[in-house]
Image: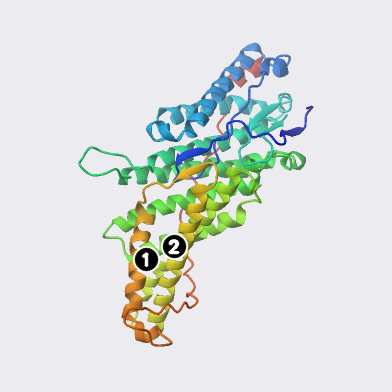
Amino acid sequence: MGCGASKWRDPGVVRQGRPRSVGEVVVFLPGLRVPRTVDFSQSLGDHLDKIAVDRLSALRATVVTMAMQESAMALKPRRRTARHGGSGTANLLQALEEYLPVLLGLVKESSDLRNKAQFVWANQEDDAEETSMADAWYEVLSVLHLMAMVCFLQANSLLLPRSYGDGHGPRVSEESRRATVDVFLKAAGYLDCAVNQVLPQIPPEKRRALPVDLVEGNLKALSLQGLGQGVDMQLGLAIDNPKATLAVKRRLACEMVKYWQQIKDSIPELPLLDGWAKKHTLFVKWKYAEAKAAAYYFHGLILDEGNTEKSQEMAISSLQASEEFLKESKRAAEAFHSTPPTSRMSTPFGTTKYLLDMIPKETLSKLQDNQDLNTQERTSNTEISRIIRPPPPLPDFPLALNPEEYELPQLNPLWKKEANH
């Protein structure tokens, strides 16, 4: 394979490990990219002290083993809720964090070790089953991506309903929803670091050979997904808080629209014949429509507080738009869950549950109250006119959530000893 990059795909063969079903999904992640075994003693044995080679080998072997285990567990729907988000993902994240400071020694300034080892990772969204590249920065990029996806896996587990033995049915607790905001911001931070600190280190010809999983647009889209779903959690908590004003809820909903619009603009062209890639596209469509449903709903409620005929008309058109976007989001959600690998819709909570409960009732009630004002022709007593008018523009708010700042760690002290040698 030399010093370049290569992709491998066996045409006509179903990719190994591709699941048929992945259980309940609240947070999209395209499986886990798993590293393949690398023999550092062969590629680095003549250039590094044996202690350093053994340390690198041991840390990476741990990552390979744990990533394979977690990937398999993540794709087993019956056991997913019982285990994920617990010690397995936490241990994998810790293993990756311990591997990174040692790995970075291969790319330090004046190092001639960067292109010595060939790193191979299994892909999830790319046409190619795996991508091999003789560049340690590719390994760093892959590690950061995996760290972010492990965070998404933890967030999904936190957002699945649980029984608390208190006489009430399974639910997603407020504590879990608050905790996921931090997890989402951490994931976004890893991906932001990947885009701004690691990708620029990879030469253009190698960047063109990266799998679609790791291209800049996809990394940005996943980082923004973390922020968008973080705002979704904040909005759900605001909805449950009687002290939160309509203005606060509208602002959060409008911010959510902007995040998902940016995701839609950033996401690269994905190979839609592939299950994960198609699900990814449908997830964005689902959440973007749901965000617009929320924004137009709260915008409509605020406009309804106005006393003029114009404000009443705009309120109705906003509420009708929210109802149409809610229907669109439900269709996209159904398409998402039915696309292989199939998944199940979790019990609605937070923003989603509120919208499903309130939008149809609020829109119908408003249409009934304003029948004479908004009907172009008389209807019977049993029908309500639904003249759809273009909704007013949503207000534009600056985005408040940002990725948690993450910097690549300092080199492991092992490399100081190596330099002395």
Asked where in the image residue 165 lies, by quadrant, the reply is top left
**Type of amino acid at the residue the image marks with label 2:** Leu
Up the image or down, 140 lies above or below 221; here it is above
Q: Label 1 neighbourhood size at 10 Å, few (<14), some (14-19), many (20+)?
A: many
Q: Is residue 398 visible?
A: no
Horizontal side of 305 relative to 259 (left or right) equals left
Cβ atoms at labels 1 and 2 below 8 Å apart: yes
3D distance between C-alphas at marks 1 and 2: 8 Å
Q: In percent of the image, x 72 and y 36: which residue is there?
A: 11
Which of the marked residues, 1 or 2, is nearer the chain's N terminus? 2
Identify which residue is drawn at 67% across, 34% down.
Answer: 129
Say which amino acid is labelled 1.
Ile
Percent of width and height locating residue 155? 43, 41
Tag 2 residue: 326
Q: Position of residue 85 (x, y in %)?
A: 41, 34
Residue 315, given in percent of the width and then of the height, sits at 39, 76
Q: What residue do we see at 43% from left, 65% from top?
A: 295
Q: Considering the numbered disc 2 on the image, is that residue within a helix, a strand or a loop?
A: helix
- Determine the image quadrant of residue 219: top right
Residue at the outermost left position: 167
Q: SS of the residue at dot 1? A: helix
Q: Which residue is mark 1?
A: 359
